[in-house]
Image: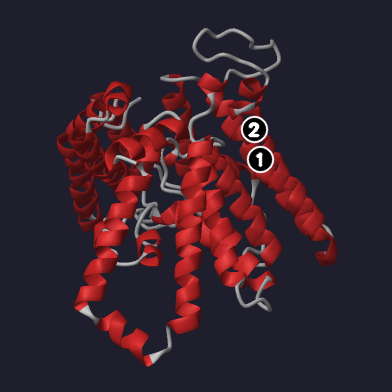
């Protein structure tokens, strides 16, 4: 069910009306879960079973971990994280690694799930489950919660396809809140939904069609420089309007349910350094990587001068591979990791120098940084538009003439 379809809008309106009419949090939770089951029925129904299985896994490992002595919880947490990675590999990559051919459908063994039918939002569910177990282990969350609350969390349909990524504790608190939807909140939510629909339908869709037409393999092979450069610029704009438009729709619909979903974009096009860019682009994902990869690594390596930069490098590699276990995403993560780690090294070595402080306040320096950030974003996101890293390199050679 497409987020821009009339079917989805009518379905969401009916779900909100039922949800707001019910008198108790427990009944409203049941309505949310039931709505998602109906939503799954319009697509691949067994995706709902996978979501329930992952929610059950989170709940079981959470209860097991909290029942153990504090010094023994690390092993249980690691097993839980491994189980989520196992879900991801099983549904997304096991068949591909065994020789399955997506073009012909041949080579799929009877016991392997078809990777072309990988559950919607699988990577989001994986990261959200890992976050909950990590919060329990680190003491940020005291209770693992009930099985039912985890199922409702996993089956929440507005964020199931494209996020933004949520935290279990925040979601559960909002769903259990007794407050009803106010007229001001409803008006704000409708405006946000319409703003997102406008971004997606009026800007993102035409930009995406134009960009992909100019980044097709034939033009790359022909070395048509102007169309390739223009296509790359339009593709980055398409990604921004597409992802932020979807996020606006999801945030607006969630507000109608009384659920506050995190913001996902905050004007990334104004960032003047690579660190600021990643605090503005896909915020829920970059925040997850910061909290559960960078911070633990930076703390573990705090005695090493370059511990924090290396933690940033590893974080960006993981962020790149989150999009897929392919060379082009690895290259994306390695490059951004090198840039972010290098920027942190520069800040550590020179950030407090008088000349560096004066330079940071300079408009010329800020403008140069903005130009670099935008150029880097446009160039590296070409790797998302082309099917392979080799074609991305071919695009670069065609544009630069090298």
Q: What's the image's color scheme?
A: secondary structure
> Mark 2 — residue?
89
Residue closer to the observer: 108 or 264 = 108
Point out residue 69 in the picture as x, y percentages from the top left corner.
Answer: 85, 63
Question: Which residue is located at x 18 percent, y 49 percent?
Answer: 191
Question: Which residue is located at x 46 percent, y 46 percent?
Answer: 332
What is the secondary structure assignment of the residue under circle 1? helix
Image quadrant in which the C terminus is located: top left
**In screen coordinates, is 253 left or right of 197?**
right
- In the displayed structure, 381 sits above or below 305; it is above
> Mark 1 — residue?
85
**In screen coordinates, is 79 left or right of 139?**
right
Residue 134 appears anywhere in the view: yes
Question: Which residue is located at x 36 percent, y 53 percent?
Answer: 264
Q: Give the label on residue 383, or none.
A: none
**Cα distance between the residues tagged 1 and 2:** 6 Å
Point out residue 213 in the picture as x, y percentages from the top left corner.
Answer: 23, 26
Residue closer to the observer: 170 or 88 = 88
Point out residue 287 in the picture as x, y percentages from the top left corner.
Answer: 47, 59
Decide: marks 1, 2 in contact (CB < 8 A)? yes
What is the secondary structure assignment of the residue under circle 2? helix
């Amino acid at each position: 069910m497409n987020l821009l379809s009339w079917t989805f809008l009518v379905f969401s309106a009916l779900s909100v009306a039922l949800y707001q009419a019910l008198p108790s949090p427990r009944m409203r939770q049941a309505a949310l879960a039931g709505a998602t089951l109906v939503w799954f029925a319009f697509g691949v129904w067994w995706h709902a079973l996978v979501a329930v299985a992952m929610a059950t896994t989170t709940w079981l490992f959470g209860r097991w971990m909290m029942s153990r002595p504090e010094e023994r919880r690390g092993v249980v947490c690691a097993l839980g994280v491994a189980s989520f990675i196992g879900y991801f590999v099983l549904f997304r990559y096991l068949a591909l690694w065994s020789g399955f051919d997506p073009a012909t459908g041949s080579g799929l063994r009877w016991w392997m799930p078809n990777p072309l039918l990988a559950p919607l939002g699988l990577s989001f569910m994986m990261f959200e489950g890992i976050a909950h177990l990590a919060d329990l282990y680190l003491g940020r969350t005291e209770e693992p919660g009930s099985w039912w609350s985890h199922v409702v969390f996993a089956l929440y349909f507005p964020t199931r396809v494209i996020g933004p990524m949520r935290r279990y504790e925040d979601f559960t608190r909002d769903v259990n809140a007794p407050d009803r939807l106010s007229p001001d909140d409803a008006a704000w939510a409708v405006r946000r939904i319409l703003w997102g629909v406008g971004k997606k339908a009026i800007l993102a869709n035409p930009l995406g069609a134009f960009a992909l037409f100019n980044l097709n393999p034939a033009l790359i092979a022909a070395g048509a420089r102007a169309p390739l450069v223009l296509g790359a610029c339009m593709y980055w704009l398409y990604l921004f309007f597409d992802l932020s438009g979807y996020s606006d729709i999801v945030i607006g619909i969630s507000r109608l349910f009384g659920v506050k979903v995190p913001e996902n974009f905050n004007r990334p096009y104004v960032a003047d350094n690579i660190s600021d860019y990643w605090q503005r682009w896909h915020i829920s994902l970059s925040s997850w990587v910061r909290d559960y990869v960078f911070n633990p690594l930076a703390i573990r390596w705090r005695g090493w001068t370059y511990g924090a930069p290396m933690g940033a490098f590893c974080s960006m590699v993981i962020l790149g591979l989150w999009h897929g276990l392919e060379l082009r995403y690895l290259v994306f993560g390695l490059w951004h990791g090198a840039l972010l780690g290098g920027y942190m090294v520069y800040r550590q070595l020179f950030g407090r120098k008088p000349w560096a402080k004066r330079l940071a306040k300079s408009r010329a320096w800020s403008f140069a940084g903005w130009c670099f950030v935008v150029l880097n974003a446009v160039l590296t996101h070409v790797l998302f538009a082309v099917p392979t890293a080799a074609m991305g390199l071919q695009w670069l050679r065609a544009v630069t003439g090298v």
